[in-house]
């Protein structure tokens, strides 16, 4: 069985590895949530985990349901070097209290940086988001306030707000052996970021939710080994859905412009699920590299 799987993987290196093997060596990206905000898609909401040599190091977004998949993945909350947020819509952030409360039982003792966008009238910034959840006396879960800086928890959540006015990649942040970089993306009026994480010379880029109008993602995703693009709308989308999200043709143009090595489509919703053949066709008008569709707990070795 193992031999057969190995042969299949060698023949088709784009295929996901088994979840149990994710990240045992090298760099791997695991999908914790491949869905959007719907209650009917059978998927956790947006969340991804970057593994380096068997350790879960970067968590990108914490959509609802993702904490259960974090547990199923075998990840250890104490290994995380940072949490990165694309934006603070529910389907990208709602599970954070579950991670913090669950992590309490693991006695993490090193600070946990939380990077995300600054706020505007539509959504809170990263600092306000953490305060609104955890800060005494009015935070919704202020009983977890020990994990904010200056309090008595075994570690602190350290908020880092990224400005969203730029149209060029923002300065690289170094987290030990990892390099992280953001660029603002157009998600309607909402402050939103795409993220690039580099480890062991491999680059993984997360589009987050975006419609492509800032033309920023190709710069951040230049020659990435893996681009995770959000496939929230079909080619025919109009109105608000199109103002917030990129159709497959835009994904294809970005992947081609950026010359990414592989493309993974996630944030799958009822309006795109079942349309995979059409979606692939629209993307392939512009991008000829490998294309895959994400499911929860899929694990991709980045080679
Ligand atoms: Zn979303």
Image (cartoon, rainbow, N blue to C red):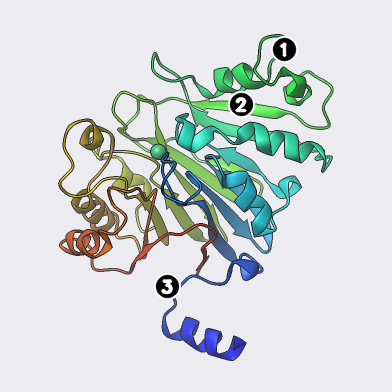
Residue topped by disc 2: 159
In the figure, is residue 214 to the left or right of 159? left
For marks 1 and 2, the one nearer the N-term is 1
Residue that appears at 66% across and 47% down: 176
- Image height of 69 relative to 168, above or below: below
Residue topped by disc 1: 136
In the figure, is residue 112 to the left or right of 87? right
Residue that appears at 20% across and 61% down: 278
Badge 3 element = loop
Looking at the rendering, the quadrant in which ligand 1 lies is top left
Q: Is residue 88 visible?
A: yes
For marks 1 and 3, the one nearer the N-term is 3
For disc 3, does the CB lie below 8 Å from ligand 1? no
Q: Is residue 149 visible?
A: no
Residue topped by disc 3: 14
Task: Compare residues 186 and 16 and report the one nearer the observer.
Answer: 16
- Image height of 147 relative to 136, above or below: below
């Amino acid at each position: 069985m193992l031999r057969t799987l190995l042969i299949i993987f060698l023949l088709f290196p784009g295929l996901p590895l088994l979840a149990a093997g994710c990240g045992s060596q090298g760099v791997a990206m695991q999908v914790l949530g491949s869905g959007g905000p719907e209650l009917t898609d059978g998927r956790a909401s947006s969340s991804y985990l970057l593994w380096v040599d068997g350790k879960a190091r970067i968590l990108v977004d914490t959509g609802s349901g993702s904490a259960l998949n974090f547990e199923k993945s075998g990840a250890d909350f104490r290994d995380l070097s940072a949490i990165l947020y694309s934006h603070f819509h529910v389907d990208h952030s709602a599970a954070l209290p579950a991670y913090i409360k669950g992590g309490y039982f693991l006695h993490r003792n090193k600070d946990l940086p939380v990077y995300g966008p600054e706020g505007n009238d539509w959504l809170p910034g990263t600092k306000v988001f953490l305060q609104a959840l955890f800060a005494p006396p009015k935070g919704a879960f202020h009983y977890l306030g020990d994990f904010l800086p200056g309090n008595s928890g075994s570690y602190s959540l350290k908020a880092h707000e990224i400005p969203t006015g730029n149209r060029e990649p923002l300065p690289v942040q170094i987290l030990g052996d990892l390099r992280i970089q953001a660029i603002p993306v157009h998600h309607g009026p909402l402050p939103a970021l795409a993220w690039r994480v580099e480890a062991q010379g491999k680059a993984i880029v997360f589009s987050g939710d975006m419609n492509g109008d800032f033309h920023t993602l190709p710069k951040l995703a230049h020659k990435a080994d893996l681009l995770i693009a959000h496939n929230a709308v079909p080619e025919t989308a109009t109105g608000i859905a199109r103002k917030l999200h990129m159709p497959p043709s835009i994904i294809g143009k970005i992947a081609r412009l950026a010359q990414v090595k592989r493309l993974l489509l996630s944030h799958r919703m009822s309006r795109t699920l079942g349309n995979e053949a059409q979606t692939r066709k629209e993307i392939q008008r512009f991008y000829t590299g490998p294309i895959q569709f994400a499911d929860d707990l899929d694990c991709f070795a980045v080679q």
